Amino acid sequence: MSLRLFVPRDTSAMACGADAVALKIRGEAEARGVDVTILRNGSRGMCWLEPLLEVERGEVRHAFGPITEGDVGGLFDIAFAADAGHPKALGPVAEIPWLKRQQRQCFSRNGITDPLALDDYRAHGGWRGAENALRMTGAAIVHAVTDSGLRGRGGAAFSCGIKWKTVLDQASAQKYIVCNADEGDSGTFSDRMLMEGDPYRLIEGMLIASLAVTASKGYVYLRSEYPLAQQVLAEALELARGAGWLGVDIQGSGHDFDIELRMGAGAYICGEETAMLESLEGRRGQVRFKPPLPAIKGLFGQPTVINNVITLASLPDILVHGAAWYRGMGMGRSRGTLPIQLAGNIKHGGLIELAFGVTLRELLHDFGGGSASGRPIRAVQVGGPLGAYLPEAQFDTPIDYEAFAAIGAMLGHGGIVVFDDTVDMAEQARFAMEFCAIESCGKCTPCRIGSTRGVEVIDRIRGGIDAEASTGLLKSLCDTMLHGSLCALGGLTPLPVLSALKHFPEDFAARPQPVVQA
Protein backbone atom coordinates (compact mmCIF):
# COMPACT_ATOMS: atom_id res chain seq x y z
CA MET A 1 0.00 0.00 0.00
CA SER A 2 1.32 3.43 -0.98
CA LEU A 3 -0.30 6.57 0.42
CA ARG A 4 -0.01 10.31 -0.15
CA LEU A 5 -1.10 12.20 2.94
CA PHE A 6 -1.36 15.95 3.55
CA VAL A 7 -0.84 17.43 7.01
CA PRO A 8 -0.93 21.25 7.25
CA ARG A 9 2.22 23.16 8.06
CA ASP A 10 0.38 26.21 9.26
CA THR A 11 0.62 28.03 12.59
CA SER A 12 -3.01 27.32 13.53
CA ALA A 13 -2.70 23.62 12.62
CA MET A 14 0.65 23.30 14.37
CA ALA A 15 -0.80 24.91 17.49
CA CYS A 16 -3.39 22.11 17.48
CA GLY A 17 -0.76 19.36 17.18
CA ALA A 18 -0.15 18.95 13.43
CA ASP A 19 3.58 18.30 13.88
CA ALA A 20 2.89 15.58 16.43
CA VAL A 21 0.32 13.98 14.10
CA ALA A 22 2.77 14.00 11.17
CA LEU A 23 5.47 12.43 13.37
CA LYS A 24 3.05 9.78 14.60
CA ILE A 25 2.03 8.92 11.01
CA ARG A 26 5.66 8.52 10.02
CA GLY A 27 6.38 6.26 12.98
CA GLU A 28 3.25 4.17 12.45
CA ALA A 29 4.06 3.77 8.75
CA GLU A 30 7.57 2.53 9.52
CA ALA A 31 6.28 0.10 12.14
CA ARG A 32 3.72 -1.35 9.73
CA GLY A 33 5.93 -1.29 6.65
CA VAL A 34 3.57 1.04 4.78
CA ASP A 35 4.90 3.36 2.08
CA VAL A 36 3.67 6.82 3.04
CA THR A 37 4.50 10.23 1.57
CA ILE A 38 3.63 13.09 3.88
CA LEU A 39 3.25 16.52 2.29
CA ARG A 40 3.03 19.58 4.54
CA ASN A 41 0.49 21.84 2.85
CA GLY A 42 -1.06 25.14 3.88
CA SER A 43 -4.30 25.40 5.84
CA ARG A 44 -7.72 25.26 4.19
CA GLY A 45 -8.87 27.76 6.80
CA MET A 46 -11.24 25.44 8.70
CA CYS A 47 -9.63 26.16 12.04
CA TRP A 48 -12.09 24.11 14.09
CA LEU A 49 -11.06 20.98 12.14
CA GLU A 50 -7.30 21.38 12.61
CA PRO A 51 -5.24 19.36 12.25
CA LEU A 52 -7.04 18.43 9.03
CA LEU A 53 -5.57 15.27 7.49
CA GLU A 54 -6.12 14.62 3.79
CA VAL A 55 -5.53 11.38 1.89
CA GLU A 56 -5.22 11.31 -1.89
CA ARG A 57 -7.27 8.68 -3.71
CA GLY A 58 -6.78 8.98 -7.44
CA GLU A 59 -7.33 12.65 -8.13
CA VAL A 60 -9.64 13.18 -5.15
CA ARG A 61 -8.49 14.20 -1.69
CA HIS A 62 -10.53 13.02 1.27
CA ALA A 63 -10.45 14.70 4.66
CA PHE A 64 -10.37 13.51 8.26
CA GLY A 65 -10.42 15.93 11.15
CA PRO A 66 -9.68 17.11 13.66
CA ILE A 67 -7.03 14.40 14.04
CA THR A 68 -5.05 13.65 17.19
CA GLU A 69 -2.10 11.32 17.68
CA GLY A 70 -4.53 8.82 19.16
CA ASP A 71 -6.50 8.65 15.90
CA VAL A 72 -3.55 7.66 13.73
CA GLY A 73 -3.47 3.94 14.50
CA GLY A 74 -7.17 3.56 13.74
CA LEU A 75 -6.76 5.33 10.41
CA PHE A 76 -4.01 2.88 9.44
CA ASP A 77 -6.30 0.02 10.46
CA ILE A 78 -8.86 1.12 7.87
CA ALA A 79 -6.12 2.04 5.37
CA PHE A 80 -7.36 5.64 5.42
CA ALA A 81 -10.48 4.56 3.56
CA ALA A 82 -12.88 7.50 3.35
CA ASP A 83 -15.92 5.22 3.12
CA ALA A 84 -15.11 3.08 6.17
CA GLY A 85 -17.46 4.97 8.46
CA HIS A 86 -14.73 6.57 10.53
CA PRO A 87 -16.25 9.17 12.91
CA LYS A 88 -13.83 11.85 11.72
CA ALA A 89 -14.24 11.20 8.00
CA LEU A 90 -15.42 14.36 6.22
CA GLY A 91 -15.59 13.10 2.63
CA PRO A 92 -14.00 14.75 -0.41
CA VAL A 93 -12.44 18.04 0.67
CA ALA A 94 -13.80 19.95 -2.31
CA GLU A 95 -17.35 18.87 -1.37
CA ILE A 96 -17.27 20.09 2.23
CA PRO A 97 -20.14 22.64 2.20
CA TRP A 98 -18.18 25.24 4.20
CA LEU A 99 -15.54 25.29 1.45
CA LYS A 100 -17.78 24.63 -1.55
CA ARG A 101 -19.89 27.75 -0.96
CA GLN A 102 -16.86 30.04 -1.10
CA GLN A 103 -15.37 32.01 -4.00
CA ARG A 104 -11.69 31.46 -3.42
CA GLN A 105 -9.35 33.60 -5.47
CA CYS A 106 -6.49 34.74 -3.22
CA PHE A 107 -6.74 31.44 -1.36
CA SER A 108 -7.40 29.21 -4.37
CA ARG A 109 -4.13 27.30 -3.79
CA ASN A 110 -4.04 27.30 0.01
CA GLY A 111 -4.14 23.76 1.32
CA ILE A 112 -3.80 22.32 -2.18
CA THR A 113 -0.14 22.87 -3.04
CA ASP A 114 3.18 22.41 -1.31
CA PRO A 115 3.84 26.06 -0.33
CA LEU A 116 7.50 25.98 -1.35
CA ALA A 117 7.36 23.79 -4.48
CA LEU A 118 7.90 25.99 -7.53
CA ASP A 119 6.68 23.24 -9.87
CA ASP A 120 3.50 22.92 -7.82
CA TYR A 121 2.95 26.68 -8.01
CA ARG A 122 3.45 26.69 -11.76
CA ALA A 123 1.15 23.67 -12.25
CA HIS A 124 -1.66 25.50 -10.44
CA GLY A 125 -1.47 28.69 -12.50
CA GLY A 126 1.43 30.44 -10.81
CA TRP A 127 3.50 33.13 -12.62
CA ARG A 128 0.93 33.54 -15.42
CA GLY A 129 -0.02 37.00 -14.16
CA ALA A 130 3.62 38.07 -13.96
CA GLU A 131 4.28 36.72 -17.46
CA ASN A 132 1.43 38.81 -18.81
CA ALA A 133 2.69 41.85 -16.91
CA LEU A 134 6.19 41.41 -18.37
CA ARG A 135 4.66 41.91 -21.82
CA MET A 136 2.79 45.09 -20.81
CA THR A 137 3.79 48.67 -20.22
CA GLY A 138 3.60 50.07 -16.70
CA ALA A 139 0.75 52.35 -17.73
CA ALA A 140 -1.22 49.39 -19.11
CA ILE A 141 -0.80 47.44 -15.86
CA VAL A 142 -1.90 50.45 -13.81
CA HIS A 143 -4.93 50.92 -16.09
CA ALA A 144 -5.94 47.25 -15.67
CA VAL A 145 -5.67 47.43 -11.89
CA THR A 146 -7.59 50.72 -11.78
CA ASP A 147 -10.30 49.33 -14.05
CA SER A 148 -10.65 46.21 -11.90
CA GLY A 149 -11.85 48.30 -8.96
CA LEU A 150 -9.31 46.75 -6.57
CA ARG A 151 -9.12 48.73 -3.32
CA GLY A 152 -6.58 48.36 -0.55
CA ARG A 153 -7.45 45.45 1.72
CA GLY A 154 -5.49 46.81 4.69
CA GLY A 155 -8.35 48.95 5.97
CA ALA A 156 -8.29 52.31 4.17
CA ALA A 157 -9.87 50.79 1.02
CA PHE A 158 -8.20 53.37 -1.23
CA SER A 159 -8.10 52.68 -4.96
CA CYS A 160 -5.02 50.60 -5.68
CA GLY A 161 -4.76 51.89 -9.25
CA ILE A 162 -4.90 55.57 -8.29
CA LYS A 163 -2.13 55.07 -5.74
CA TRP A 164 0.01 53.28 -8.33
CA LYS A 165 -0.64 55.98 -10.96
CA THR A 166 0.73 58.57 -8.53
CA VAL A 167 3.94 56.55 -8.08
CA LEU A 168 4.25 55.83 -11.81
CA ASP A 169 4.01 59.54 -12.60
CA GLN A 170 6.92 60.47 -10.32
CA ALA A 171 10.19 61.17 -12.11
CA SER A 172 12.53 59.27 -9.84
CA ALA A 173 15.34 56.84 -10.57
CA GLN A 174 14.53 54.84 -7.41
CA LYS A 175 11.10 53.62 -6.42
CA TYR A 176 10.03 51.06 -3.85
CA ILE A 177 7.31 48.46 -3.29
CA VAL A 178 6.57 47.90 0.40
CA CYS A 179 4.31 45.09 1.56
CA ASN A 180 2.75 45.87 4.92
CA ALA A 181 2.56 42.41 6.50
CA ASP A 182 2.44 43.72 10.07
CA GLU A 183 -0.95 42.06 10.62
CA GLY A 184 -1.86 43.18 14.13
CA ASP A 185 -5.65 43.54 14.26
CA SER A 186 -7.52 41.26 16.62
CA GLY A 187 -9.20 38.36 14.84
CA THR A 188 -7.09 38.64 11.68
CA PHE A 189 -4.88 35.95 10.21
CA SER A 190 -5.39 36.03 6.43
CA ASP A 191 -1.95 37.55 5.76
CA ARG A 192 -0.27 34.89 7.87
CA MET A 193 -2.21 32.06 6.24
CA LEU A 194 -1.34 33.25 2.75
CA MET A 195 2.36 33.76 3.47
CA GLU A 196 2.61 30.33 5.09
CA GLY A 197 0.45 28.53 2.55
CA ASP A 198 1.09 30.28 -0.80
CA PRO A 199 4.10 32.62 -0.49
CA TYR A 200 4.84 32.80 -4.22
CA ARG A 201 1.48 34.50 -4.79
CA LEU A 202 2.68 37.43 -2.69
CA ILE A 203 6.05 37.49 -4.47
CA GLU A 204 4.30 37.45 -7.84
CA GLY A 205 2.00 40.29 -6.77
CA MET A 206 4.95 42.41 -5.64
CA LEU A 207 6.73 41.71 -8.94
CA ILE A 208 3.64 42.87 -10.88
CA ALA A 209 3.53 46.06 -8.77
CA SER A 210 7.21 46.71 -9.50
CA LEU A 211 6.60 46.37 -13.24
CA ALA A 212 3.66 48.76 -13.02
CA VAL A 213 5.61 51.62 -11.44
CA THR A 214 9.19 50.72 -12.51
CA ALA A 215 10.41 49.92 -8.98
CA SER A 216 13.60 47.94 -8.50
CA LYS A 217 13.44 47.16 -4.79
CA GLY A 218 10.78 45.70 -2.52
CA TYR A 219 10.42 45.12 1.20
CA VAL A 220 8.11 42.86 3.18
CA TYR A 221 7.60 44.28 6.66
CA LEU A 222 6.52 41.17 8.55
CA ARG A 223 4.91 40.98 11.97
CA SER A 224 7.49 39.88 14.53
CA GLU A 225 5.08 37.34 16.05
CA TYR A 226 5.03 35.29 12.83
CA PRO A 227 8.18 33.11 12.99
CA LEU A 228 6.82 30.38 10.70
CA ALA A 229 5.74 32.91 8.06
CA GLN A 230 9.23 34.38 8.29
CA GLN A 231 10.81 30.96 7.73
CA VAL A 232 8.56 30.04 4.79
CA LEU A 233 8.77 33.44 3.11
CA ALA A 234 12.56 33.63 3.47
CA GLU A 235 12.94 30.25 1.79
CA ALA A 236 10.42 31.16 -0.93
CA LEU A 237 12.36 34.35 -1.72
CA GLU A 238 15.57 32.37 -2.16
CA LEU A 239 13.89 29.79 -4.40
CA ALA A 240 12.19 32.50 -6.50
CA ARG A 241 15.54 34.24 -6.85
CA GLY A 242 17.15 31.00 -8.01
CA ALA A 243 14.39 30.48 -10.57
CA GLY A 244 14.89 33.93 -12.07
CA TRP A 245 11.71 35.53 -10.73
CA LEU A 246 13.65 37.96 -8.56
CA GLY A 247 16.99 39.67 -9.05
CA VAL A 248 18.66 41.05 -12.17
CA ASP A 249 17.08 40.78 -15.65
CA ILE A 250 13.99 38.87 -14.52
CA GLN A 251 13.12 36.16 -17.04
CA GLY A 252 15.27 37.97 -19.61
CA SER A 253 13.02 41.03 -19.55
CA GLY A 254 15.64 43.58 -18.59
CA HIS A 255 13.65 44.43 -15.44
CA ASP A 256 15.51 44.25 -12.11
CA PHE A 257 13.57 43.68 -8.90
CA ASP A 258 14.41 42.05 -5.60
CA ILE A 259 12.64 41.73 -2.25
CA GLU A 260 14.09 42.03 1.25
CA LEU A 261 12.32 40.57 4.27
CA ARG A 262 12.32 42.75 7.38
CA MET A 263 10.85 41.81 10.75
CA GLY A 264 8.54 44.27 12.48
CA ALA A 265 9.24 46.08 15.72
CA GLY A 266 6.43 44.40 17.68
CA ALA A 267 4.39 47.61 17.88
CA TYR A 268 0.79 47.93 16.70
CA ILE A 269 1.44 51.46 15.48
CA CYS A 270 3.91 50.12 12.90
CA GLY A 271 0.93 48.81 10.97
CA GLU A 272 0.27 52.48 10.11
CA GLU A 273 2.05 53.03 6.82
CA THR A 274 4.23 56.00 7.74
CA ALA A 275 5.23 54.55 11.13
CA MET A 276 6.19 51.40 9.23
CA LEU A 277 8.39 53.47 6.91
CA GLU A 278 10.09 55.03 9.94
CA SER A 279 10.75 51.55 11.33
CA LEU A 280 12.10 50.33 7.97
CA GLU A 281 14.50 53.24 7.94
CA GLY A 282 15.83 52.23 11.36
CA ARG A 283 14.00 54.73 13.54
CA ARG A 284 11.34 54.48 16.21
CA GLY A 285 7.93 53.74 14.72
CA GLN A 286 6.20 57.11 14.86
CA VAL A 287 3.57 58.50 12.52
CA ARG A 288 4.69 61.03 9.91
CA PHE A 289 2.79 64.15 9.01
CA LYS A 290 1.04 64.01 5.63
CA PRO A 291 1.53 65.50 3.08
CA PRO A 292 3.81 64.51 1.50
CA LEU A 293 2.14 61.20 0.72
CA PRO A 294 4.30 58.07 0.65
CA ALA A 295 3.44 57.68 -3.04
CA ILE A 296 5.40 60.88 -3.64
CA LYS A 297 7.94 60.85 -0.82
CA GLY A 298 7.95 57.52 0.99
CA LEU A 299 10.72 55.10 1.92
CA PHE A 300 14.08 56.89 2.07
CA GLY A 301 12.32 59.90 0.56
CA GLN A 302 11.48 58.09 -2.70
CA PRO A 303 8.10 57.32 -4.36
CA THR A 304 6.72 54.20 -2.70
CA VAL A 305 3.81 51.83 -3.30
CA ILE A 306 2.52 50.54 0.04
CA ASN A 307 -0.03 47.71 -0.03
CA ASN A 308 -0.86 44.91 2.32
CA VAL A 309 -0.52 41.18 1.64
CA ILE A 310 -4.06 40.51 0.41
CA THR A 311 -4.05 43.53 -1.93
CA LEU A 312 -0.84 42.35 -3.59
CA ALA A 313 -2.02 38.73 -3.63
CA SER A 314 -5.11 39.81 -5.60
CA LEU A 315 -3.03 41.07 -8.53
CA PRO A 316 -1.96 37.85 -10.32
CA ASP A 317 -5.54 36.79 -11.04
CA ILE A 318 -6.45 40.26 -12.34
CA LEU A 319 -3.54 40.09 -14.79
CA VAL A 320 -4.62 36.58 -15.88
CA HIS A 321 -8.41 36.91 -16.11
CA GLY A 322 -8.74 40.64 -16.77
CA ALA A 323 -10.15 43.69 -15.05
CA ALA A 324 -13.74 43.02 -16.15
CA TRP A 325 -13.68 39.55 -14.61
CA TYR A 326 -12.57 40.92 -11.25
CA ARG A 327 -14.96 43.86 -11.42
CA GLY A 328 -17.78 41.41 -12.09
CA MET A 329 -17.63 40.19 -8.48
CA GLY A 330 -18.89 42.20 -5.52
CA MET A 331 -21.33 45.07 -5.03
CA GLY A 332 -21.30 48.85 -5.36
CA ARG A 333 -17.75 50.19 -5.24
CA SER A 334 -16.53 47.10 -3.39
CA ARG A 335 -15.33 44.78 -6.14
CA GLY A 336 -13.71 41.36 -6.10
CA THR A 337 -13.47 39.08 -3.08
CA LEU A 338 -12.51 39.59 0.55
CA PRO A 339 -10.92 36.96 2.79
CA ILE A 340 -13.05 37.21 5.94
CA GLN A 341 -11.74 35.87 9.22
CA LEU A 342 -14.14 34.58 11.89
CA ALA A 343 -12.73 34.51 15.42
CA GLY A 344 -13.77 34.88 19.04
CA ASN A 345 -16.81 33.06 20.43
CA ILE A 346 -17.72 31.27 17.19
CA LYS A 347 -18.33 27.57 16.61
CA HIS A 348 -16.68 27.31 13.19
CA GLY A 349 -13.91 29.88 13.21
CA GLY A 350 -11.68 30.23 10.19
CA LEU A 351 -11.11 31.97 6.87
CA ILE A 352 -13.91 32.49 4.35
CA GLU A 353 -13.30 34.11 0.97
CA LEU A 354 -16.38 35.49 -0.76
CA ALA A 355 -17.33 38.33 -3.07
CA PHE A 356 -18.50 41.49 -1.33
CA GLY A 357 -22.22 41.46 -0.58
CA VAL A 358 -22.60 38.56 1.84
CA THR A 359 -24.21 39.68 5.11
CA LEU A 360 -22.83 39.43 8.61
CA ARG A 361 -25.72 37.17 9.57
CA GLU A 362 -24.89 34.71 6.81
CA LEU A 363 -21.25 34.66 7.90
CA LEU A 364 -22.05 34.19 11.58
CA HIS A 365 -24.67 31.49 11.18
CA ASP A 366 -24.38 29.83 7.76
CA PHE A 367 -20.58 29.65 7.95
CA GLY A 368 -19.77 30.23 11.61
CA GLY A 369 -22.50 27.98 13.00
CA GLY A 370 -23.37 30.43 15.77
CA SER A 371 -21.47 30.97 18.97
CA ALA A 372 -19.11 28.34 20.36
CA SER A 373 -20.84 28.65 23.75
CA GLY A 374 -24.27 27.96 22.23
CA ARG A 375 -25.56 31.25 23.64
CA PRO A 376 -27.02 34.06 21.51
CA ILE A 377 -24.52 36.28 19.71
CA ARG A 378 -24.87 39.74 21.22
CA ALA A 379 -22.23 41.71 19.34
CA VAL A 380 -19.44 41.48 16.81
CA GLN A 381 -16.46 43.72 16.29
CA VAL A 382 -15.39 44.08 12.67
CA GLY A 383 -12.13 45.70 11.62
CA GLY A 384 -9.84 45.00 14.56
CA PRO A 385 -9.57 46.67 17.99
CA LEU A 386 -10.55 50.04 16.48
CA GLY A 387 -13.70 48.72 14.82
CA ALA A 388 -17.24 49.45 15.96
CA TYR A 389 -19.25 46.96 18.02
CA LEU A 390 -22.30 45.94 16.02
CA PRO A 391 -25.50 44.64 17.66
CA GLU A 392 -27.75 41.89 16.33
CA ALA A 393 -30.00 44.51 14.72
CA GLN A 394 -27.19 45.32 12.26
CA PHE A 395 -26.26 41.75 11.34
CA ASP A 396 -28.04 42.07 7.98
CA THR A 397 -25.48 44.66 6.86
CA PRO A 398 -23.68 43.43 3.73
CA ILE A 399 -19.90 43.16 3.66
CA ASP A 400 -19.31 46.37 1.70
CA TYR A 401 -17.10 49.36 2.50
CA GLU A 402 -19.82 51.95 1.96
CA ALA A 403 -22.53 49.93 3.75
CA PHE A 404 -20.32 49.71 6.82
CA ALA A 405 -19.43 53.40 6.69
CA ALA A 406 -23.15 54.21 6.59
CA ILE A 407 -23.64 52.60 10.01
CA GLY A 408 -20.53 54.15 11.53
CA ALA A 409 -18.38 51.06 11.15
CA MET A 410 -15.48 49.85 9.02
CA LEU A 411 -14.44 46.58 7.39
CA GLY A 412 -10.74 47.05 8.01
CA HIS A 413 -8.76 43.91 7.29
CA GLY A 414 -11.86 41.69 7.31
CA GLY A 415 -11.52 40.29 10.82
CA ILE A 416 -14.71 39.57 12.75
CA VAL A 417 -14.58 38.91 16.51
CA VAL A 418 -17.74 37.42 18.02
CA PHE A 419 -19.18 37.91 21.53
CA ASP A 420 -22.11 36.09 23.11
CA ASP A 421 -24.66 37.61 25.50
CA THR A 422 -22.37 37.36 28.53
CA VAL A 423 -20.06 40.12 27.24
CA ASP A 424 -19.71 43.37 29.21
CA MET A 425 -19.68 46.05 26.53
CA ALA A 426 -18.58 48.80 28.93
CA GLU A 427 -15.51 46.70 29.68
CA GLN A 428 -14.92 46.32 25.94
CA ALA A 429 -15.16 50.09 25.49
CA ARG A 430 -12.65 50.56 28.30
CA PHE A 431 -10.35 48.05 26.62
CA ALA A 432 -10.40 50.08 23.40
CA MET A 433 -9.20 53.20 25.23
CA GLU A 434 -6.63 51.25 27.23
CA PHE A 435 -5.33 49.57 24.05
CA CYS A 436 -4.89 52.97 22.42
CA ALA A 437 -3.05 54.31 25.46
CA ILE A 438 -0.63 51.37 25.44
CA GLU A 439 -0.03 51.32 21.68
CA SER A 440 0.08 55.07 20.99
CA CYS A 441 3.34 56.28 19.45
CA GLY A 442 2.97 59.39 21.61
CA LYS A 443 3.38 61.93 18.82
CA CYS A 444 -0.01 63.65 19.04
CA THR A 445 -1.83 64.82 22.16
CA PRO A 446 -5.39 63.63 21.36
CA CYS A 447 -4.21 60.02 21.07
CA ARG A 448 -1.51 60.02 23.76
CA ILE A 449 -3.44 61.89 26.47
CA GLY A 450 -7.02 61.40 25.27
CA SER A 451 -6.88 57.61 25.50
CA THR A 452 -5.56 57.72 29.08
CA ARG A 453 -8.25 60.19 30.10
CA GLY A 454 -10.80 58.00 28.30
CA VAL A 455 -10.03 55.05 30.55
CA GLU A 456 -10.46 57.27 33.62
CA VAL A 457 -13.78 58.70 32.42
CA ILE A 458 -15.22 55.25 31.65
CA ASP A 459 -14.21 54.15 35.15
CA ARG A 460 -16.08 57.17 36.54
CA ILE A 461 -19.19 56.27 34.54
CA ARG A 462 -19.10 52.66 35.67
CA GLY A 463 -18.56 53.77 39.24
CA GLY A 464 -21.65 55.99 39.13
CA ILE A 465 -19.63 59.17 39.67
CA ASP A 466 -21.59 61.99 38.02
CA ALA A 467 -22.52 59.52 35.28
CA GLU A 468 -24.51 61.89 33.05
CA ALA A 469 -21.81 64.58 32.94
CA SER A 470 -19.08 61.94 32.58
CA THR A 471 -20.90 60.38 29.61
CA GLY A 472 -21.09 63.77 27.94
CA LEU A 473 -17.40 64.31 28.64
CA LEU A 474 -16.55 60.91 27.13
CA LYS A 475 -18.43 61.76 23.93
CA SER A 476 -16.68 65.14 23.72
CA LEU A 477 -13.32 63.45 24.26
CA CYS A 478 -14.09 60.96 21.48
CA ASP A 479 -14.93 63.85 19.16
CA THR A 480 -11.55 65.46 19.89
CA MET A 481 -9.71 62.20 19.24
CA LEU A 482 -11.69 61.56 16.06
CA HIS A 483 -10.93 64.94 14.51
CA GLY A 484 -7.62 65.83 16.13
CA SER A 485 -5.50 62.69 16.01
CA LEU A 486 -2.63 62.44 13.56
CA CYS A 487 -3.42 58.88 12.42
CA ALA A 488 -6.09 56.20 12.56
CA LEU A 489 -5.06 54.80 15.96
CA GLY A 490 -6.36 57.81 17.88
CA GLY A 491 -8.82 58.73 15.16
CA LEU A 492 -10.64 55.39 15.16
CA THR A 493 -10.51 54.45 18.85
CA PRO A 494 -13.79 56.40 19.34
CA LEU A 495 -15.61 53.92 17.05
CA PRO A 496 -15.77 51.01 19.52
CA VAL A 497 -16.40 53.36 22.46
CA LEU A 498 -19.25 55.32 20.86
CA SER A 499 -20.83 52.20 19.34
CA ALA A 500 -20.83 50.50 22.74
CA LEU A 501 -22.45 53.59 24.31
CA LYS A 502 -25.04 53.79 21.54
CA HIS A 503 -26.07 50.16 21.24
CA PHE A 504 -25.42 48.83 24.76
CA PRO A 505 -26.07 51.76 27.15
CA GLU A 506 -27.33 49.44 29.87
CA ASP A 507 -23.81 48.06 30.35
CA PHE A 508 -22.60 51.49 31.45
CA ALA A 509 -24.92 51.62 34.45
CA ALA A 510 -23.23 51.99 37.82
CA ARG A 511 -22.36 48.70 39.46
CA PRO A 512 -21.71 47.89 43.11
CA GLN A 513 -18.11 48.45 44.10
CA PRO A 514 -16.30 45.77 46.10
CA VAL A 515 -16.26 46.39 49.84
CA VAL A 516 -12.75 46.76 51.21
CA GLN A 517 -12.44 45.45 54.74
CA ALA A 518 -10.47 47.63 57.17
Image: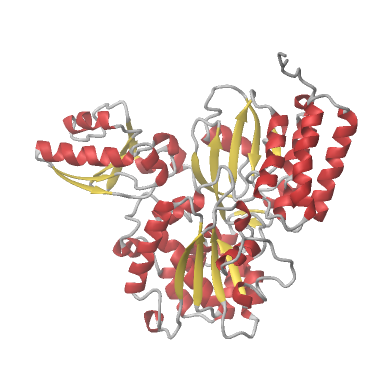
Residue at x 60% of width, y 66% of height? 283
Residue at the spot 65% in from the left edge and 73% down from the top edge: 295
Q: Pinpoint residue 293: horizontal percent, then vertical percent.
A: 70, 71
Instruction: Decide which of 404, 67 is in the foreground and name it.
Output: 67
- The answer to whether residue 220 is seen in the rendering is yes
Query: Is 187 situated above or below 286?
Result: above
Residue 62 seen in the current view: no
Q: Is residue 291 above or below residue 410?
A: below
Between residue 304 and residue 207, name the one nearer to us.
304
What sort of colour scheme is used for the picture?
Answer: secondary structure
Taking the spot 54% from the left edge, 34% from the top edge, the residue there is 366
- Please identify the residue farthest to the right as the structure is shown: 469
In the rendering, at what x and y percent does residue 111 appear? Answer: 37, 49
Q: How many marks?
A: 0
Where 269 falls versus 126 (above or below)?
A: above
Q: Residue at x 57, y 38 (%)?
A: 363
| Quadrant location of the N terminus in the rendered image | top left
Q: Position of residue 129 (x, y in %)?
A: 45, 69
> 327 or 486: nearer the eye?
486
Quarter-of-image position of residue 51: top left
Quadrant for the C terminus, please: top right
Looking at the image, the residue that sits furthest to the top is: 517
Direction front: furthest residue: 518
Q: Is residue 354 toward the left or the right of residue 169 in the image?
A: left
Residue 360 point in image, percent of width and height: 63, 38
Residue 149 occupies quadrant: bottom right
Horizontal relation, residue 110 to residue 503: left or right? left
Q: Residue furthest left?
A: 33
